[in-house]
Image: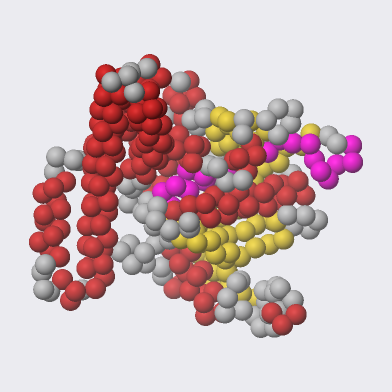
Amino acid sequence: MRAEVQNIVDKIRKSVDLLAQRLNVETAPYRLEEFNARVEDPTLWDDPEAAQKLMRDRQGLVDAMATHDGIKTDLQDNIDLIELGEMEDDAEVVAEAEAALTKLAVTAAQKELEALLDGEADANDTFLEINSGAGGTESCDWASMLARMYVRWAEKKGYTVELQSESAGEEAGIKSAAYKISGHNAYGWLKSESGVHRLVRISPFDSAAKRHTSFTSVKVYPVVDDNIEIEVNPSDIRIDTYRSSGAGGQHVNTTDSAVRITHAPTGIVVTSSEKSQHQNRDIAMKALKSRLYQMELDKRSALVNEVHENAGDAGWGNQIRSYVLQPYQMVKDLRTQYETSDTKGVLDGDLDGLMGATLALAVSGKSRAEAQES
């Protein structure tokens, strides 16, 4: 077997080993038996929510087992084909098997990343907030570029994207925007994006064509489902309604339908202005609960605290990632040191490499300083 192909085989084996570890492959069949026994219980659907959770958990285990076993089997089958082709001097068989292994390596790497998404709320939908920071019009334009980047990424994942609220910039771009992104593992993937994002480029708004630096903050919170209870004291919140801006014409808003909720103990403010007042109130309450839940997650996890430690001010020294478009092309994550020169691809939503590196960092348990030294 050629050295290049052997390297691919080794990478796939490492992915299979990680999948086995995350699955706890030795006990998986017994856990599936327990799930099957509980599914056959005639009283299961007396509690529909508990039953639905059980079915989701069972299906997750089934899918994880099938993924691990399928990659392991495909790996061995193609290794056997290569050995057979080499014995019989059949170059076509060898080439086909090598091509299959190359594709399998991509699949295995993707499944390896997905296996890291086993946090308490990783499987949930997510809220994504984008707020322009230091840089004026430049920052507002950068915020709109980031919004487009995340929407493109979500669409490539097959996720559903709902705009919750948006505030336009005075000259260009947006001051802020909030989205709900729905799909399996949406929060698990996007949680690593919380922090300040820095852009360096030749400004399209500067007649002197000078290089400008802009900052925008991104904050990500899991959508709290019915299995996670968050209590909000009614006396701790203030609910304001105001007139939201419509699309114009027959769609223009003529009532005070937008809702803003302020949580006094934490200072958290959430808004929703895309639907009816009743719907906006419900959306805003869910967003508030998600913010409060995220605060609790931050308290539990030192790593998450580190990732969010500078999420307050969008400015110098607080960035988690730099996007340099001039004088060279480079996107670099400052936590993992992962970098790529494919700036166009990243801004078009190719973010899995950046996200995956941060997920791997979370599992490895390295500090930011250790990651920067490596």
Residue 152, above or below 95: below
Q: Residue at x 34, y 21 (%)?
A: 6
Residue 198 visible (yes or no):
no
Q: Residue at x 61, y 65 (%)?
A: 165
- Say left or right for 68 vs 338: left
Image quarter (top left, top right, bottom left or bottom right) of the N terminus? top left
Residue 275 point in image, percent of width and height:
58, 76
Residue 309 point in image, percent of width and height:
50, 40
- Say left or right for 307 vs 115: right
Residue 271, above or below 62: below
Is 284 in front, or is 76?
A: 76
Q: Does the magenta stretch include residue 226?
A: no
Residue 94 point in image, percent of width and height:
35, 26
- Say left or right for 320 vs 305: right
Q: Which picture quadrant has residue 84?
A: top left
Q: Residue at x 71, y 44 (%)?
A: 134
Q: Which residue lies furthest to the right in this view?
A: 207
Is 68 in front, or is 159?
A: 68
Q: Magenta segment range?
A: 187-208
